[in-house]
Amino acid sequence: MRILVTGATGFTGGYLLEELAVASPSGHEIIAVSRNNSGKLPESVTFYKADLTSYRETLECVNASNPDAIIHLAGIRAGDLGDLLSVNVMGTKHLLDAVCESGIDPAVLVTSSSAVYGYAGELPITEDTPFRPVNDYGVSKAAQDALALSYHFRHDLKVSVARPFNLTGPAQDDSLVLGKLVRRWVESEKGGEKVELFNTGSMRDFIDIRDAVRAYRMIVESPSFPDLCAGKVFNIGSGRPNSIDDAIGLMREITGSNVEITATDSGFKEPVPSQQADIRAVRLLGWEPEIPFGKTLLDMYIHMVGGMK
């Protein structure tokens, strides 16, 4: 199977390329696409530089790679709404338009986000839960999500959508809460300042990046993709919410260090006090989350310590 991966040089992309290469070292031909330089890629991966905000570059990439499957990861989390819509929505539109124009018929998995749901209450969130995004990123992913599914119904493309919840794992940067917690923890152990956090009681469904990319692979590899996946959405989560307080307790167990944590009262009201994924749909494909939250934190800690030596 020829699999094209967009956004391949990002955090998720690196793990996905490794998952595809290891799971089927001789069975997949992998084409990594990014607008940035390729960096370090598995030897079996072919790199193609393209910016999906350019339709010409996107069409050239699709025609040159002629994929059997596409896993669309490319996107941005930060920026004003115009930037987010340009990359997350128009980049997706260019990719799907290129598939239509090229005349190929690949299985296409578009990665969205649980940010589309916002705060949906305390119960597990199903795929048909209404969208209630609370920020511009969530708005852009909601638009991307709806656009992707529309190509299945309007153009009969084999498009599916994955909505990952809170992705985390080794090498995650500190722009996200667990990456920040682990980095500050290691710095504090080395004599740095105490760790300051706020809203440590909010609940999130953290999913290890290695479990998530395995789900992406299993979706596009499904021999029943046209019947079981096309036109459908899959929540990708652990199904078990945890708070930052839980993470702090686990970090103390893992490290044996009683790092001082200061709760900062910024006056900020958490718009999404909890999220929990209902993952029954993706389980029907044979996928299960395998990596416990404590194992994820341990691996993040080991990776961070190694990187700071």
Image (tube, rainbow, N blue to C red):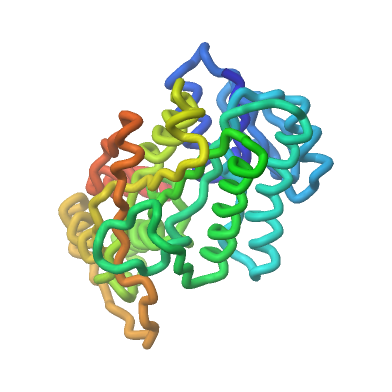
Residue depicted at 31% across the width and 33% down the height: 284
Q: Quadrant of residue 273?
A: bottom left
Given the current orientation, which residue lies at the most extreme bottom position? 267
Rendering coords of residue 213 (x, y %): 44, 36
* 130 left or right of 146 in image: left
Q: Is residue 105 above or below residue 110?
A: above
Above or below for 80 versus 108: below
Taking depth in this image into account, of 23 and 259 the one nearest to the observer is 23
Q: Nearer the viewer, residue 41 or 192?
A: 41
Relative image position of residue 111 (x, y in whole percent): 52, 46
Q: Where is residue 277? Give x, y as percent.
A: 31, 53
Residue appearing at x 59%, y 59% in the figure: 143
Task: Give the camera-side residue of 183 and 113.
Answer: 113
Which residue: 39% across, 76% down?
271
Residue at image location 35% in from the left, 44% down from the top: 208
Query: What is the number of callouts on the image?
Result: 0
The answer, for residue 306, to whether it is visible in the render is: no
Whether residue 101 is visible here, answered yes or no, is: yes
Q: Quadrant of residue 31?
A: top right
Furthest toward the right, the residue is 56
Residue 95, above or below 137: above
Asked if residue 285 is positioned above or below residue 232 in the image, the reply reads above
Return the residue nearer the eye: 234 or 12.
Answer: 234
Q: Residue 292's quadrant in the figure?
A: top left
User: In the image, is 14 to the left or to the right of 289?
Assistant: right
Quadrant of the drawing holding the N terminus = top right
Q: Position of residue 29 (x, y in %)?
A: 60, 19
